[in-house]
Amino acid sequence: MTQPRSLVVNPDRFNENIMMIKEMGFDPLKSMFIQAVYIMSVISKSTWEAKLEVYKSEGWSENEILHAFKSQPMCMALSEKKIRKMSRYFVKKMGWKPSVISRNPSIMNFSLEKRIHPRCSVLQILMSEGLIDKDSNPAWALLLSEKDFKEKFVIKNQEKVPKIRREYQNMIGVVGLDIESKELDGIQKF
């Protein structure tokens, strides 16, 4: 019911997809199984192979690709251009290993300009100030809601790093990230 397009494919191909997905270790009773069936139904074998090659060309191992697909099947629905762009940003700009990305594959779906780059800029500032351990895995911060990210990283640290709010504001292009002092009082500092 959630992915009816998956049922429109050739029955032989549908069965082949089901067998392949089961062999990958998907549990047929979980929702990720349905998403995997959908993805395998809407992309051709040649497109699947081409995307595997793109991930591999960006330094991903087969295990990392499989792990990402099992965690977030939509990572194989991304265009080859987006896979390259996101992988290169995380690996070259942020210095992350593909294994970090494969453990958090949902981050590949976000907008580089609107979400990833602004948040990573804040994280880099905090790392340079010693407020975040450089060896930590900050990828989880990209998954937070906008409100939670601002509270945990921008507001919490604006006294220690006064430029952080301005930098984040400039990065996201928002005028008025201004927060009333009474709002600051109600925010827990972790």
Image (cartoon, helix red, strand yellow):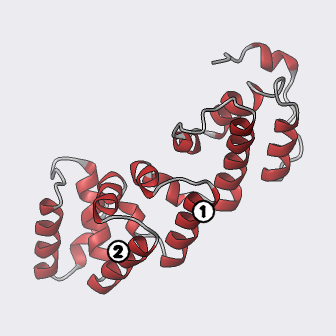
Q: Position of residue 160 (x, y in %)?
A: 82, 24
Q: Position of residue 98 (x, y in %)?
A: 44, 58
Disc 1 from disc 2: Cα separation: 20 Å
User: What secondary structure is found at the residue carrying circle 2?
Assistant: helix
**Res. 34 image quadrant:** bottom left
Label 1 CA crowd tier, 10 Å (few <14, some 14–19, many 20+): few
Label 2 CA crowd tier, 10 Å (few <14, some 14–19, many 20+): some
Q: Could you tell me which residue is drawn at 51 percent across and 40 percent down?
A: 137
Q: Could you tell me which residue is drawn at 84 percent across and 44 percent down?
A: 167
Q: Could you tell me which residue is drawn at 87 percent across and 33 percent down?
A: 178
Quadrant placement of the N terminus? bottom left
Quadrant placement of the C terminus? top right
Query: Is residue 118 depicted above or below 83 in this figure?
Result: above
Q: Position of residue 164 (x, y in %)?
A: 82, 37
| Residue assigned mark 2 | 52
> Is 24 displayed left or right of 52 in the figure?
left
Query: Is residue 101 depicted above or below 82 in this figure?
Result: above
User: What secondary structure is found at the residue carrying circle 1?
Assistant: helix
Q: Nearer the viewer, mark 1 or mark 2?
A: 1
Q: What's the residue type where badge 1 is placed?
A: Lys
Q: Position of residue 43 (x, y in %)?
A: 33, 78
